Image (spheres, rainbow, N blue to C red):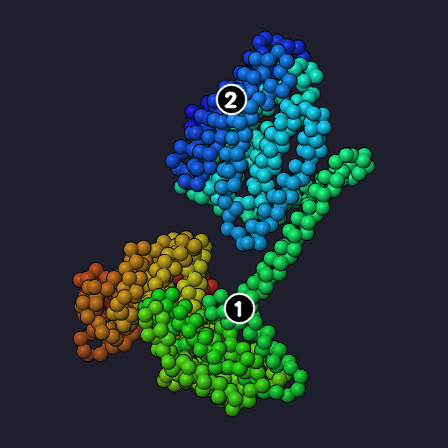
Amino acid sequence: MHGSDRLLRASGVSALVATLWFAVNVVHPVGPRLLLWLPTIVGGALLVVGLRRTARTETLLPAARRFWRHLTAAAVFIAFGVAAQAVDVLSEDHPRGAQTGPVMLIMCGTGVLIIMYALFRLPLGRRSAGELLRVVLDAGTMMLAAAVFLWHFSTRTALSNGDDAGFYLSLFVTMIAILAVFAVAKFVLSSHSHIDNEALRLLAVAMFVGAVAPLFRGTFEAVDAHLFPDMVSTPIVYYFAVLAAARQRTTPGGTRRGVVEPRRRSFSVLPYVAVAAVDGLLIYVTATRSSDAAVVVASAVVLTALVVLRQLTAFRDNSRLLARLDHSATHDGLTELPNRVLFHTRLEKALNAPGDRPVAVALIDLDDFKEVNDTLGHEVGDLLLVGVAKRLEGCVRAEDTVARLGGDEFVVVLDDADPAAADLAAERMMNALKQPVYADGHELPIRASIGIADGRTGDRPSVLLRHADIAMYAAKTIPGTACLHYDPTMAVTGNDLGSELRGAIEDGQLFLLYQPIVSLDDGHIMGAEALVRWAHPLRGTLAPDAFIPVAERTGLIVQLGHWVMRTAFAQLAEWNVIHGDAAPRVLNVNVSARDLREPGFAEHVGTLLAEYGIDADRVVLEITETMALEPGPSVINLLRLRRMGVRVSLDDFGTGHSTLTLLHDCPIDEIKLDRSFTQSQVDDRPPVSAAVIHLAQALGLHAVAEGVETADQAEQLLSLGYVAAQGYHFARPMPPARLSELLAAKTSLMPSPAVSPA
């Protein structure tokens, strides 16, 4: 890095010395003429060294190193060409024309061709054919405009004066200028991930300076025939190139450590500026009746044609883009079926049609689709969805609409279809879905539930879809693929809870209560268990037993579980802020079997812990014995949770297949004695709770007794060695605000009288 700094400083000093020494000699000749050319020789050597260092930087990508190798080769030719120019000029007493000797032209011309080749090799990024054509047209417009100006103000004059040297110099300058314009156009209109954009800007500036400087040759020849603008411009060009090379070495763009994705430039004003400039030149040559007016007019016509062609391609591509955007906005990306937005549009159109016509909606849900995703992977699940979509499309008429609502739910709008016609369509769909789908070498049987809602024009779309949803959940109670029409009696059964539960989660109808877990020794709050409730708008507050089975059956249990966990974690974080050390030491959250089978469940818990700033050991996830026995993802998630520090509790211990092997092998920290054993302590039989606490102590597990309802039960549990318990004897489940009051008061719950359960 320090070597690069010294090289850059040396190049800058060379350019500064050249500028100052040239300015002094413009005022009055001083010293030998060789000193005027010396910075160009030194600067050329520094340029070759700087470019070579960049080309050999190992951290650059191969394409970037290749680009800088080409520039290094070009710099060698140009440096020798400038040296030859200096020799030619210094060896002549009258150097007019000597600055464009054959060696100089050949060497510098070769260098220019190499640079042009390197620029052509720069990628244009990922672009469509239309975008590539527009880039070429824009670059061509800018280059043609530059060529017209150079012809009018330089080449034409030299040719008309019979100045061969001036003509060749003008041609060379024109080539350099067009190259500079091409470089600017390539940078502005392209995207480069392996070449630093700032380095490209510096190179474009260098080429622009090199192209413009010779145009001032006549100005300095009038002062001294041995003064050439190349003496100043060349070291400056070298400095910008060395600066560009240093920039490339010190930035991540184009390195193996990080390819910077460029920002796509969708529009540039430069081509339009070029056209406007040529139009201005056209007005000028017309007003002055210049001899080359025909050339400028022809160029203006060609430029106009290029702009028109460019606009036509842009209009065509924009039309295609709008069509793709419209399709993406209204169609499912996986199955290419209409999505929810287009479905609602089609349904509203059918229901708002003139006249009195029947309209039916069939809602199809794939049962056990999640099992396919969990066991065979999402790719196989996607193939299953695509296969189902194709089969459903083959079962309906052209005027009907098959749409995917999301996940494994499809819906069909049957326009002008009475119940009999809807039955025929449903029969075709069921027959099509009876055949398995072959996906990635797997034979996948399909089991679907279909709910049909029969309506007529004028009905509300939301009501019709809700009826289909209720019928579909009713069909789920029938084994195998089944179809049911909506019946008003379904609304008074539990079949519509599934459809209502979706909205309940989104509309904030669910809430959490918290039951304290207390110390049996002094009754102080040690923790709390989060318990979900549903404030149903018609049925009142529903306990988990009323809707958890529905959530399990419909797959909503995962979404419900995520809501419960996020809400509980947020509440614990709030208690931590308000109460500090007095906040519940642990918070117990129930986890469903479907949650535990989710491949990313442990990571989801970790994300929530980090989001709310909760220590992992402050959370206890309660699982059942059946869940603990499940192999595969469940055990993997449990192990990951334990490694994170999250504690796991075995809920309702003793009611399932409790074995010593389970307690030994399953990664758990706590067992919760089921209320059936807690409430049998007053019997004459040896208490099971005594055996459980001894077992827990032997295995190093924490034990919590559930369902404690009397003082006698609490006293006996304490005498057996239990430390913590929960139940109506201490407190019922309560809103978070009430528990917060108890925490603030540091109230002991032990004095509470026995309370019978409601």
Residue lying farthest to the top in this orientation: 31
549 or 406: nearer the viewer: 406
User: Do we see residue 542 in this rendering?
Assistant: no
Amino acid type at circle 2 is Gly
Q: Residues within 10 Å of mark 2 (few under 14, many from 20)?
A: many
User: Do we see residue 38 in this rendering?
Assistant: yes
Task: Give the labeled residue for mark 1.
Answer: 331
Q: Quadrant of the C terminus?
A: bottom left
The answer to whether mark 1 and mark 2 are in CB contact below 8 A is no
Which quarter of the picture shows residue 19? top right
- Identify the residue at image location x=34%, y=63%: 599
The first of marks 1 and 2 along the sequence is 2
Amino acid type at circle 1 is His
Look at the picture and state if 193 lies above or below 716. above
- Identify the residue at image location x=27%, y=76%: 676
Q: Please indicate whether residue 231 sits to the left or right of residue 728 in the image.
A: right
Nearest to viewer (mark 1 / mark 2): 2
Residue lying farthest to the bottom in this orientation: 420
**Gap between marks 1 and 2 measured at Cα:** 61 Å
Task: Give the labeled residue for mark 2.
Answer: 43
- Identify the residue at image location x=71%, y=33%: 152
